[in-house]
Image: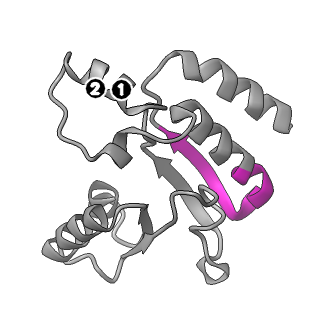
Amino acid sequence: PLLALSLHPEWKMIGTDINEQALHSARTNVEKNGLLPKIDLRLVRSDGRVLIDALKEHDGTLDFCMCNPPFFAAEESAHKAAHYRTCDANPDELVTPGGEAQFVRDMIADSHILQGKVRWYTTMVGHKASVAGAVAQIKGCG
């Protein structure tokens, strides 16, 4: 969001997280960059709908949705992967039920319901194995 707004200062952004501490850090970064009027930060529930619960009626149509989902379905998988690289993250940033594959499927399902409310979706995918299922689901949406 900070880079996007430096390139497109007319944009407005919405940032979401399930972790209050992460949201506080984000708010600090946004404030330090003088972008608080441009970025609306929202705490969302971890057991809610990925996109539908985050968006409000007054948000109107959004240009894009950018996502960096938790990659792992279990903490033990995250710990096994973490010994190959340095990883300084909270467990809820790394782990979600069903891992990134389920998170992305939920995001796709929400995008199908939202239709044109968001024009463009993008998400990071950390496991190549997650891609085929996501593509199949997108194709299934028509």
Q: Is residue 68 above or below residue 61?
A: above
Q: Which residue is mark 1?
A: 76
Horizontal side of 29 relative to 48 (left or right) equals left
* Circle 2/circle 1 CB separation < 8 Å: yes
Residue 10 position within the rendered picture, expressed as x and y whole percent measured from the top left: 40, 73
Residue range highlighted in magenta: 110-123
Of residues 119 and 94, the one nearer the viewer is: 94
Residue displayed at 19% across by 33% down: 87
Rendered residue at 58%/47% (across/down)? 121
In the depicted view, which residue is nearer to us: 116 or 102? 102
Dot 2: element: helix
x and y, in percent, of residue 15 in the image: 41, 65
**Residue type at the position of mark 2:** His
Q: Quadrant of residue 1?
A: bottom left
Give the structural element (helix, strand or loop) at label 1.
Answer: helix
| Mark linked to residue 38 | none
The verdict on residue 115 being magenta is: yes
Q: Please, what is the three-letter code of the amino acid marked with disc 1?
A: Glu
Image quadrant containing the C terminus: top right
Which residue corresponds to the image point at 37% horizontal and 48% vertical from the top-left?
Answer: 92
x%, y% of residue 17? 41, 61
- Crowding at mark 1 (Cα within 10 Å: few <14, some 14-19, many 20+): few
Q: Is residue 80 above or below residue 39?
A: above
Report which residue position mark 2 lands on. Answer: 79
- Position of residue 14 measured from the top left corner of the image (x, y, whole percent): 45, 68
Name the image quarter holding residue 64. bottom right
Looking at the picture, tell me which residue is in the foreground, 122 or 69.
69
Q: Is residue 72 magenta?
A: no
